[in-house]
Image (cartoon, rainbow, N blue to C red):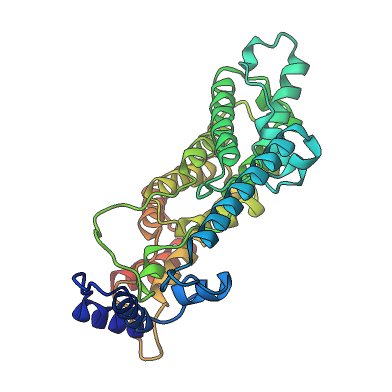
Amino acid sequence: IPKLLNNMHVVLLHGVDDDDEEKEKDHQSAKELYDLLPKTPMSPHQLNTLNGSLGNGGGFFPNMSSSRRATEDFKLDAEQAATKRKTTVDDPQSQAVQPTLTEAQHALIAIELRPLSEIEWLDERHHTLSHWLDCCCARLDFYSTNQYEWEAIQKKKQLLSDILDYLDMTEEVWSDEAMLKSLMKMIKSNLFRALPITYRQLLATPDYCQEDDSEEYEDPNYPHLCYVYEIALMLVRNINVDDRARKKYLGKTFIVPLTELFASEDVREREYLKAILHGIYARNMRLRRLIRQQMNHCCYRVIYSTSTHNERTREDDIENGISECLQLVCSIIQGLTTPIKPEYKNILYTVLIPLHK
């Protein structure tokens, strides 16, 4: 690139003499200018090699006959491409060859939307709901430019909205363990994922230019995640869910990866996580110790993320979710009674005081 820029600078300094009357001198001047640039497959001297000799009056560029041949070849290629597109549309087997969407995404697009409340029979309604939940387990790429992918994204968003509306007006779903299993499968498939690249990771790259620090990060998957978090929050808070089923599905395999999502850069997602963990803590006595341990681990990352000389490796390295974890710890402390258990004293000595330092 520096060599190319230097050559372009030389070309601009030399300029082109448009007043030359001699044709040969004109071509020689142009040739000298082009020789200053690095050779590429589309350079004029490469085109000469591809098209053969230039003829008497061609000068530096291809002659008219080669231009006409190129135009005819271009028209032929366009006709062949049009014929190929027509064949692809008419032949279903050709369409199947194109790598557009997965089977799960195809099933998502093929769903016919209709309100679940309009389905008369309960078994059929639950069967349709279960099928919708299975289809919503498919993850979609919000960065894709494929129009079919965006159709699937919009269809999934509408499905999640309809599911949320139906769950808000019915009570039969919460007593059906098969439906709870499908709900938990959909929730885990959407929430437990690899988080997008963070601003701190971008700052570590030399080609990143941070324009405005005041702008809050927005996860591209949030249009779907907001509905999934609402469904999860409804599952946690609903009083019609059986306690045994709640303990079965909202256990360690759900809480541990859920607390890891506090690393998300999206503030809205962390607020949902705080609300869900607070609801689980209030309704499940046996899971309280596990939640306290996970909150402590989140704080330990900030306390012990230091070098050997007890200095921060990066001054601006602030762990996401620490504020939400401290709010949960604060709500726990407000409910304490005397005598205080040694576990809570340990939180004071090992978490709160080191964080205050």
Identified at 59% across, 26% down, the residue is 163
Report if residue 134 is visible in the image: no
* Left or right: residue 165 compared with residue 203: right
Query: Quick one: 304 or 123, which is closer to the camera?
Result: 123
Residue 332 drawn at (x, y percent): 42, 50
The picture quadrant where one finds residue 44 is bottom left
Residue 52 drawn at (x, y percent): 57, 73
Query: Quick one: 292 or 61, which is closer to the camera?
Result: 61
Residue 317 drawn at (x, y percent): 34, 71
Residue 258 drawn at (x, y percent): 55, 52
Quarter in which the N terminus is drawn: bottom left
The picture quadrant where one finds residue 210 is bottom left
* Depicted 160 relative to depicted 299: above or below: above
Report if residue 323 is visible in the image: yes
Identified at 59% across, 47% down, the residue is 75
* Depicted 37 relative to depicted 282: above or below: below
Query: Quick one: 19 or 1, which is closer to the camera?
Result: 19
Residue at the far right: name it: 93
